[in-house]
Amino acid sequence: MATTSDIKNGMCINHNNGLWTIIEFLHVKPGKGAAFVRTKLKNLTTGKVVDHTFNAGHKIEPVRIETREYQYLYNDDMGYHFMNNETYEQVAIEKHIINAPQFLKDGLICMIQFHADEERPLQVELPSHIEAEITYTEPGLKGDTATNTLKPATIDTGVEVRVPLFIDTGDWIKVDTRTGDYSERLKK
């Protein structure tokens, strides 16, 4: 068992019969009254973020989490299949614990967080950016690069993103998987 003095950002705890990760915290010592710790917690199963206040010295139960590198293979009715590149062990993961399943491509390296004691996958994090090829977009007109206007484009994963007017079909772009936004055009 640990206490509130052991709290760190990124720490995972068992709280209210669920696994929560600490996003941020603040130790508060008011001039009058007892000290307390104000935290922002994120539920690992639902993704819900809540504010919670612990009294100073409150006992918390830390949970050991391991992050491992896995390669995405394919998906079917059993789930999304990933492979550990060191042990070649494969694991099927449900769609709801993947942060951006629409951007998964064959061979993409992802980070999977496991509950170390139960060997249960908790969360799948894609890289912050992926490279994608534009499979369809309306052609841009010459001289349309001066404005900040965006147009819809479909990438090779089937997702529609907004891109600048100078991007054409067949171009490679970098896409932010956290927001789904266009980042830059790549030279291929």
Image (cartoon, rainbow, N blue to C red):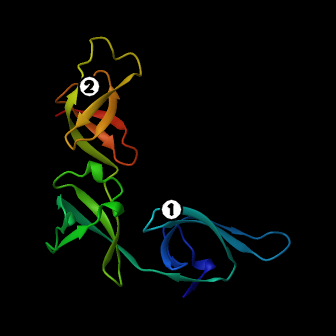
Q: Residue, x 16% and y 67% (percent of image)?
A: 85
Q: Residue, x 31% and y 29% (percent of image)?
A: 152
Label 1 to label 2: alpha-carbon separation: 36 Å
The part of the image, by quadrant, that contains residue 80 is: bottom left
Pointer 1 with pointer 2, Cβ within 8 A: no
Is 38 on the left-hand or right-hand side of 139?
Answer: right
Is 165 on the left-hand or right-hand side of 38?
Answer: left
What's the amino acid at mark 1? Lys
Report crowding for label 2: few under 14, some 14 to 19, many 20 or more residues within 10 A (C-alpha).
many
Relative depth, front residue between 86 and 150: 150
Mark 1 secondary-structure assignment: loop
Q: Is residue 25 above or below residue 15?
A: above
Report crowding for label 1: few under 14, some 14 to 19, many 20 or more residues within 10 A (C-alpha).
few
Which quarter of the rendering shows the N terminus?
A: bottom right
Q: Is residue 27 above or below residue 115?
A: above
What's the amino acid at mark 2? Ile
Mark 2 secondary-structure assignment: loop
The part of the image, by quadrant, that contains residue 164 is: top left
Mark 1 vs 2, N-terminal side: 1
Q: Which residue matches tag 2?
A: 167
Q: Is residue 144 above or below residue 30?
A: above
Is 18 on the left-hand or right-hand side of 96?
Answer: right
Q: Which residue matches tag 1?
A: 48
Judge depth for marks 1 and 2 and give the one in front. Answer: 1
Relative depth, front residue between 144 and 97: 97
Residue 11: give x, y in percent of width and height. Answer: 49, 72
